[in-house]
Structures are given as C-alpha cells and as structure tokens.
Image: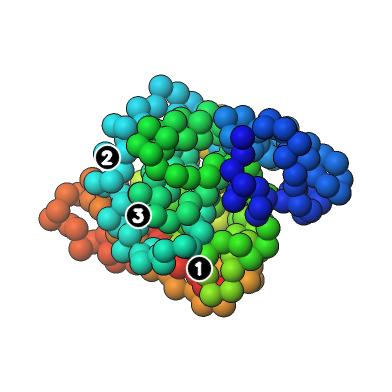
Amino acid sequence: MIDKNLLSILICPTCRENLEAISPYILNCKKCKKQYRVVDGIPIFFDQNSLGDDLALAHEKWEVFYHNFDWEKELKAYNQNNLPYIFKHVEPIRSGSKFMEIGSGASFLCFALASRGIEVIAIDFDIAILQTAKKYFEKYKVKGHFICANVQNLPLATNTIDVSAGIGVIEHTNDITLSLKEIARVTRQGGFTFQTVPVFSLTTLILNQRYGTIPHIPVLKDIFILFHIKFLKAHHMAYGYEESFTRGFLKHSFEDAGFTSVTLGFFDYGQSIMRKVFGKILRPLIRLRPFWDIVFIKAYK
C-alpha cells in the first residue's frame, strides 16, 4: 500500500493532475485516466521506452553497476568517504522539511537524513535498487518514500520540496535544462537544491576520459561523442552518458531554470582523481581552477 503522505503530493507526469489509489497496486490519474503500477509500495512512473539514447545508456550502465550490490557494505564506505563532504553544504535541514534525492540509487543520503527525522523522498529510474534500499530502510526502522521516475519529468506537485540534492546526477543527460526546470518547479519558495557536477577542466578533459566524460563545449562535444559512443561503443562510460560543464554555463542554467541565488565552488569530496594519482604532495594542485574535477552548486528559489 502506498503511503498516504506520499500520495498527497504525487501527480500524473503526463497531465500534472492528482492521482488516486484504486488498489494497493494501481494509481489512477483523475483527469487523463492513465494508470501507474505500485510495486512493494513504490509507484512506478518510469518508462524506459520513452528515453533518449543518453538516458537509456545511463540506465543500462547503472543496472550493471547495481548487480550483486552489497548495500550495507557500501553504506559504511559512503558514510566515511562521501557523507561528511555533502553535509558541509546541505546541513542544517529543519525538522519537518521534505527532502528529495534525485538519482538516489541506494539512497544513502536519504537514509542518513531520515535517520535524523527528515521526511525523505528517494527518486531513481532503477526499480531494483529502490526495492533494495526500501528493504534496508525497513530493516533499520527508518522511514522513507521511494519513487521510480525520470528526473526530467517528476511526478511531484509544484512547490512541495524544501531541499533536494543530486550527487553526480544531472550530468548524465545531453540536456540538463529539463532536469533543472523540474527541480525548480517542485522546490518551494525559499527552498534550495544542492548538486555536484563535473566541471570542464584539464582533469575532466584528460584523466576523466576513463569515464567517457564529454565536454559540453561546441565542436569538442561532437568529437568526444564520436570517439566514446560511435567509435568505442561506450566501453569506457562506466556510469553511462556523462558531460562536464563550464562554471558560467552551470550558473546561467540554474538561473534560467528559476533559481534566484546560485553559489558555485570547488567540491572537495576527499577522493579526487588528482589526489589518487599524485598523492598528498601535490594536494594543493587540485584546488587550482584548471584542475578542478567536480563543482558544487547550491541554488535557492
């Protein structure tokens, strides 16, 4: 049975009207009459057949990545290697806030916040990993909502989310504007989103080619797509289609989407590729603009 609190903010992604539960397994749109399945309490709005080549590739790669995924083992690593750096930017979140994690996957960030009493909504296009996450939430008696959906067409009512985050998510499409407009639409006035994204630099241009990172730069983008997708058949694209962006492009994109205050800076997440390659001796190097690999964006509506 789908949670009533979640149902109250769900909408049909086709016509943006309210939904009703006509059984524990079916949601029905009151206007267009389209129906959506509910599996293990998780509403499914994701339609793989509607994806473009970019998101289809990402979906394919992440399905492979999550095969035989050890949730509890990976949670410990995430809490040590990722969470402290994320919490520097997203905390504090007031009690009673609604938090949305896009591309949540194993939903570790949601798990950490839900453990502190925050109402969390985990959104991903892989139903299997959401089912795994939900199982462990229930095992540890942590509450959370789970939705299988495409971030470019969120099934959430407008102005309902206080805080959202996407850790390395919005770059997995060749048009981030659709994702940003949807994130802005569901964000309440005064709310904010926190995103981490690859930035165009010497690091992403050279070293990050092991992930097939494509620079969002005219001409260069076409060349790298030809090389990684047409020639190498996405062999090196471990996480699917991925782009890197200039800081100016990112700032303008968030503003154009509807965010009024946008802060952007170097995201020192403790495991930069530059640090792995060069060690602590050249640690200051990764803080120089030409060598950044990831930036954070904190944007208020």
Q: Residue furthest bottom?
A: 260
- Residue under circle 2? 77
Q: Secondary structure at mark 1?
A: strand
- Residue under circle 3? 116
N-term-proximal mark, 1 vs 3: 3
The mark lying in front, picked from 1 and 3, is 3
Q: What kind of colouring is applied to the model shown?
A: rainbow
Query: Residue 28 placed where, x, y %?
Result: 78, 40
Q: Are marks 1 and 3 in contact (CB under 8 Å)?
A: no
Q: Nearer the viewer, residue 187 or 241?
A: 187
N-term-proximal mark, 2 vs 3: 2
**Residue neighbourhood size for the residue with mark 1, other residues' Cα within 10 Å, grouped as few (<14), some (14–19), many (≥20):** many
* Cα separation between marks 2 and 3: 19 Å
Placement of the N terminus among the 4 image quadrants:
top right
* Cα separation between marks 1 and 3: 19 Å
* 194 lies above or below 126: below
Q: Residue furthest right?
A: 32
Q: Nearer the viewer, residue 84 or 195?
A: 84
The numbered disc on residue 182 is none
**Residue neighbourhood size for the residue with mark 2, other residues' Cα within 10 Å, grouped as few (<14), some (14–19), many (≥20):** few
- Residue under circle 1? 192
Query: Residue 86 placed where, x, y %?
Result: 34, 57
Placement of the C terminus among the 4 image quadrants:
bottom right
Q: Residue at position x 47%, y 62% from top?
A: 96
The amino acid pointed to by label 3 is Arg
* Cα separation between marks 1 and 2: 27 Å
Q: Residue at position x 50%, y 68% from top?
A: 192
Q: Residue furthest top?
A: 68
* 191 lies above or below 15: below
The amino acid pointed to by label 2 is Ala
